[in-house]
Image: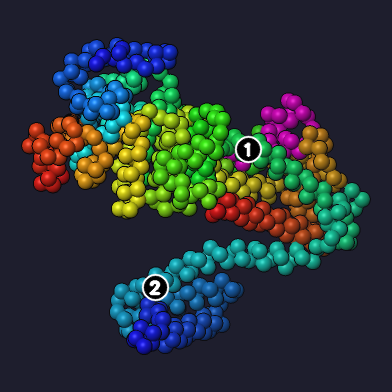
Amino acid sequence: MSTATLMKPQKPWQASTQQRLISASVFLVAAAISYGVVAATPMKGKLAYVFVFFASLSVLDFFFHLVTRGISAAKDAVARTVVAFGICVAVLPIVSILATVFMRGYKGLHFGLFTHDMKLNSVSDPIAQGGLLHALIGSTILVLVALVISLPLGILTAVYMTEIRGRFMRPIKFLVQAMSGVPSIVAGLFILAAVVYPLTKSYSGFVGSLALSILMIPTIARTSEEVLLLIPNDLREAGVALGGTQWRTVAMVVVPAARSGLVTAMILGIARIAGETAPVLLLSGGGDQVNANPFSGPMGSLPFYIWKSYSVGTEESITRAWAAILVLLVIVLVLFISARLLSERRTNK
Amino acid sequence: MTTSENQKDPEKNMQTPSVVSSLGSVAKTQSAPKSPGSQALGVGLEARGVHAWFGDRLVLEDMSLDFWSGTVTALIGPSGCGKSTFIRTLNRMHEFIPGAAMAGSVLLNGQDVYAPGTDVTKIRLKIGMVFQKPNPFPSMTISENVLAGLKLAQIKVENKDDLLQECLERAGLWNEVKDRLGAYGGSLSGGQQQRLCIARSLAVRPEVLLMDEPCSALDPGSTLKIEETISHLSSTMTIIIVTHNMQQAARVSDYTAFFLSDGGPGKMVEVGPTGEIFSRPKDKRTENYVTGRFG
């Protein structure tokens, strides 16, 4: 037998058990300190624990590594703690939101939510009565119509900015960036003044979608622009060198190559508008019954339902609002994951 | 040989360039290599006093060169001497670079590709190009890649399967991919991808094939395969290959042109049959370069 067969696979670059134990004890000491400090001083709440914990952890880590391994290891340890703190600051609110929505929302969930509307019920009725159907259908139609308007416009804007690079590229880039900061209520008021008062004079889902498109186009255009810029120039040159016109090269080579990124742009656009309340409130009203026609009559939507239920303020209505938030969140999440999976499956094959 | 004698497609009403006459004298001073008798199919592509600029910087000065049909011409020279820029002027890819400018004329079958009113997409159909880095279209399968040029240029063909097989065979790739034509182009190895790109160029039936360092990213085995492909193709079309590999130039080409830049714009030092350039170059600088004494 050669010696090679006696060798066991090892990972000498990883921390040993002893080092791990030491790190864990430093961790525990820091936790104990934070507990003690919060108990001994007038500081209160969970955030105080987090702050004191990270502060004491970085100090302990620094001195421990300074003594055992020198100054650069000590700096490294502090940097690691700071990064971990940053991650917590970024992730905690999201986890907290998800947990709260789930904890409060699941009590209001029942099958009738997806089969009934609120035509015969008020939001203060017992939770088992009435449902979200009108809001679900309304939100879906609002988002789909907005998507049909915004997706081609957004992608074509991005194509203009990355492929055609015409004379108006800079002003358009500037406008798109400025537009992505437009408050949603302003978009709603604009459509109200530009379309509803002079033309339609009534609530409808379509005008709501118009306002949502104003919010959606810049998001799609900016994301698509970044995605199209990532496509290597080689591909454009190859397309043109084969005798394709610029337009056909963009349509057949560049855009398909960017497909998964463009799907992401679409998802971000939908995520941007799915929860918008203000323009919907102004323009689509908020019916309590199913209305599948975007061109006439008030149209319900999930954000509107949430706002209305929550503002009533009874125990039942607030539970309804949380249930609707949970449904909205799950829909956006499912959409996000399925679009991701779809685009990845196509590119990985 | 004048341009009018050489017009193979008079029915294609491209305008005869007026600029040729003014630069004709330049062209005459550059003696074109004599074509071997067996391959005397005429001049397929002629560069006449081609200059190229990027912004204000002249990068290529007064390049006049004839490319004979059915031959392989290698362009050699150190980096930055304008070889790639030169071949990109031949199929009008030069103009894609912002700030690019050019002067002179490029004649394809006697007609100036830069003449006003020329349909540039038709020019690029006739003058195909293979790039330094293999660049198959990532969203397309192998067969879609090969036939992409037809779709891009909106050309109808009777039997796509035959064309697909023919192009892949000519590119020396058929046996390796015939069982997985539906796989994505990106799933091939680098050398196979480059041969796929060659097959893709062949599908639109170009008269001239420009190759910009096609083997620089490939291993010796793939390089050998591509060189075999080049020798197969050269009997039916004009091939112009830029290469940094002097053995490759010696192996595949009939003619070799040596480009050099002395810090300023790139110029052609010498052109001739490959054997002469490598064994008895007329210019001292060519001799230094091909023997590896500099560059």
Q: Compared to A276, does B270 lie above or below?
A: above
**Residue at the extreme left of the image, as rendered:** B284
Residue A176 shows in this picture: no
Between residues A50 and B45, which one lies in front from this camera angle?
Answer: B45
Q: CA distance from mark 1 to mark 2?
A: 46 Å
Q: Residue at x 65, y 63 (%)?
A: A97
- The image shows residue A73 at horizontal and vertical percentages of 33, 76
Chain assignment, label 1: A
Name the residue carrying label 1: A150
In the figure, B181 relative to A253: above or below?
below
Q: Residue at x 71, y 29 (%)?
A: A195
Q: Is residue A321 left or right of residue A95?
A: right
**Crowd around label 2: few <14 · some 14–19 · many ≥20 (10 Å):** many
Q: Which residue is mark 2?
A: A78
* Marks 1 and 2 close (CB-CB < 8 Å): no
Closer to the camera, A346 or B110? Answer: B110
Q: Secondary structure at mark 1?
A: helix
Q: Residues within 10 Å of mark 1 (few under 14, many from 20)?
A: many
Which kind of residue does numbered mark 1 sit on?
Ser
Chain assignment, label 2? A
Which residue sits at x=50%, y=66%?
A: A87
Please report the bounds of the magenta region as a residue range: A191-218
For residue B123, say whether it is visible. yes
Counting residues from the start of the chain, the first of labels 1 and 2 encountered is: 2
Which quadrant would residue A219 be assigned to in this image? Answer: top right
Image color mode: rainbow
Per the rendering, the mark at residue A92 is none
* Magenta highlight on residue A230: no
Seen at 50% across and 84% down, the residue is A28
The x and y percentages for residue B143 are 52, 43
**Three-letter code for the amino acid on which mark 2 is drawn:** Val
